[in-house]
């Protein structure tokens, strides 16, 4: 296939000084397999398979900037220098196999001190302490619990907010030291920054609440703090819930305003998800059909004049390519589909007519698969000889 005819999904994209080999992004996926915040062999195998499968960018799961910012005892963190060598092991493997290693940094806020999703995110209680899983104090914009059964969070004062911003800065520096080349600030799905953005969770009457500018203040301060240590030649993403969940009061107009302000502060790409201010982290206020978040990505891209990453049940190669061809987004994020098929990029390239689709795989895979293709072609020719 000629370069001019190559599908956009498999055309490299420049992100500051980086060039991703294609537009396929492995979205952050919480795995609840961390040990005291740090990654294990599980993460090396889990994330490594996506690099071997041909993805252009591979995100680690949402990673907390401080210990109390984790949701569960087994969520990821990068709040201690001892985490850095373990993460460097991951980034070196991903880079060696052609993927850009990326990390999403965040803070659970009032969604913290809970159990894993297969235990229905049950808030931890004193009864969990005997199993080494005692609850811890949680924080938020206001003293409003996430649900009727959830712990009531402490409302952060201004001095505590300043310390929190410094944690984001330190986490970004650790991520850089660990070899990450792309960073995303997590301001979606009901996590702490979303709690400040949304009037549902933010009832403050100081400079971090009230009108839109006040509610956006912490998110923008975090972006500035991260960008102050994140090199100018490396890209920075922002993930947002474009609209709140049920009874939402954070709107798409608000998201466009935030995206514009974020772009001015050094954000290169906005990932547009939705929901999560009440209930599960990715609860959406719209019907879940393939590409249900794409209209958000398209409007933010057009009105905020910033690159966007489209997510939301995009599983078919032709659909992913169509989104890019229509100018609705610049990158395509997949999550659960890649858990089912980590070699989705190579399969998608083949489906879209990329001649060298096997080049996305390691040489030890591609060489043998090419031989199998040769045998298949010979067999097919023998079965259906051409008539002279």
Image: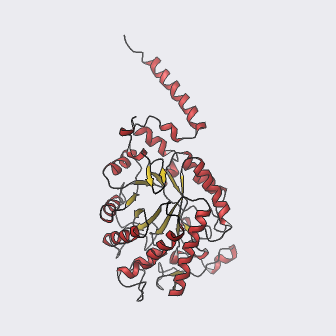
Residue at horizontal 37 percent and vertical 80 percent from the top: 213
- Against 372, residue 255 (above or below) is below
Image color mode: secondary structure
Q: Report the label total.
A: 0
Whether residue 246 sits left or right of residue 107 in the image: it is: left
Q: Residue at x 55, y 72 (%)?
A: 169
Q: Is residue 156 above or below residue 256?
A: below
Judging depth in this view, the residue of 189 and 8 nearest the camera is 8
Nearest to the observer: residue 121 or residue 284: 284
Considering the image in quadrants, where does the N terminus appear? Answer: top left
User: Based on the displayed image, in which of its 4 quarters is residue 52 positioned?
Assistant: top right
Q: Is residue 331 above or below residue 354?
A: below
| Res. 37 image quadrant | bottom right
Instruction: Name the residue: 60% across, 55% down.
Output: 91
Nearer to the camera, 201 or 9? 9
Residue at the far bottom in the pictured view? 205
> Is residue 173 visible to us here?
yes
Q: Residue at 59% x, 74% y: name it.
A: 66
Q: Is residue 32 visible?
A: no
The residue sitting at the top extreme is 388
128 to the left or right of 249: right
* Quarter of the image with the C terminus in it: top left
Q: Position of residue 324 (x, y in %)?
A: 35, 50
Q: Whole-percent x and y of residue 291?
A: 36, 55
Residue 18, percent from left and from top = 49, 54
Where's residue 304, x and y in %? 33, 65
């Amino acid at each position: 296939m000629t370069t001019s005819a190559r599908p956009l999904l498999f055309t490299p994209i420049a992100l500051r000084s980086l060039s991703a080999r294609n537009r396929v992004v492995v979205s952050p996926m919480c795995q609840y397999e961390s040990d005291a915040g740090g990654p294990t062999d599980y993460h090396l195998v889990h994330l490594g398979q996506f690099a071997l499968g041909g993805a252009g960018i591979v995100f680690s799961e949402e990673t907390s900037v401080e210990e109390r910012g984790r949701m569960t005892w087994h969520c990821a963190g990068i709040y201690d220098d001892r985490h850095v060598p373990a993460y460097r092991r991951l980034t070196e493997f991903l880079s060696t196999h052609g993927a850009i290693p990326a990390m999403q940094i965040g803070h659970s806020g009032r969604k913290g001190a809970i159990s894993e999703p297969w235990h229905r995110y049950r808030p931890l209680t004193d009864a969990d302490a005997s199993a080494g899983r005692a609850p811890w104090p949680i924080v938020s914009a206001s003293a409003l619990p996430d649900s009727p059964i959830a712990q009531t969070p402490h409302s952060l004062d201004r001095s505590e907010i300043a310390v929190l911003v410094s944690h984001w800065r330190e986490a970004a520096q650790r991520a850089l030291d660990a070899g990450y080349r792309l960073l995303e600030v997590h301001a979606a799905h009901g996590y702490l920054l979303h709690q400040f953005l949304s009037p549902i969770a933010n009832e403050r009457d100081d400079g971090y609440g009230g009108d839109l500018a006040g509610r956006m203040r912490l998110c923008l301060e975090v972006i500035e703090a991260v960008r102050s240590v994140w090199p100018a030649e490396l890209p920075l993403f922002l993930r947002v819930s474009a609209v709140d969940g049920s009874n939402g009061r954070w709107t798409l107009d608000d998201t466009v305003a935030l995206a514009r302000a974020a772009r001015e502060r050094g954000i290169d790409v906005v990932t547009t998800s939705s929901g999560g201010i009440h209930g599960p982290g990715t609860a959406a206020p719209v019907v879940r059909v393939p590409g249900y978040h794409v209209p958000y990505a398209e409007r933010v891209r057009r009105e905020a004049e910033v690159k966007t990453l489209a997510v939301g049940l995009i599983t078919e190669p032709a659909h992913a390519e169509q989104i890019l061809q229509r100018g609705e987004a610049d990158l395509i994020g997949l999550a659960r589909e890649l858990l089912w098929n980590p070699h989705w990029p190579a399969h998608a390239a083949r489906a879209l007519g990329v001649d060298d689709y096997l080049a996305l795989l390691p040489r030890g895979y591609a060489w043998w698969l090419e031989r199998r293709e040769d045998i298949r072609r010979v067999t097919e020719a023998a079965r259906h000889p051409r008539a002279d």
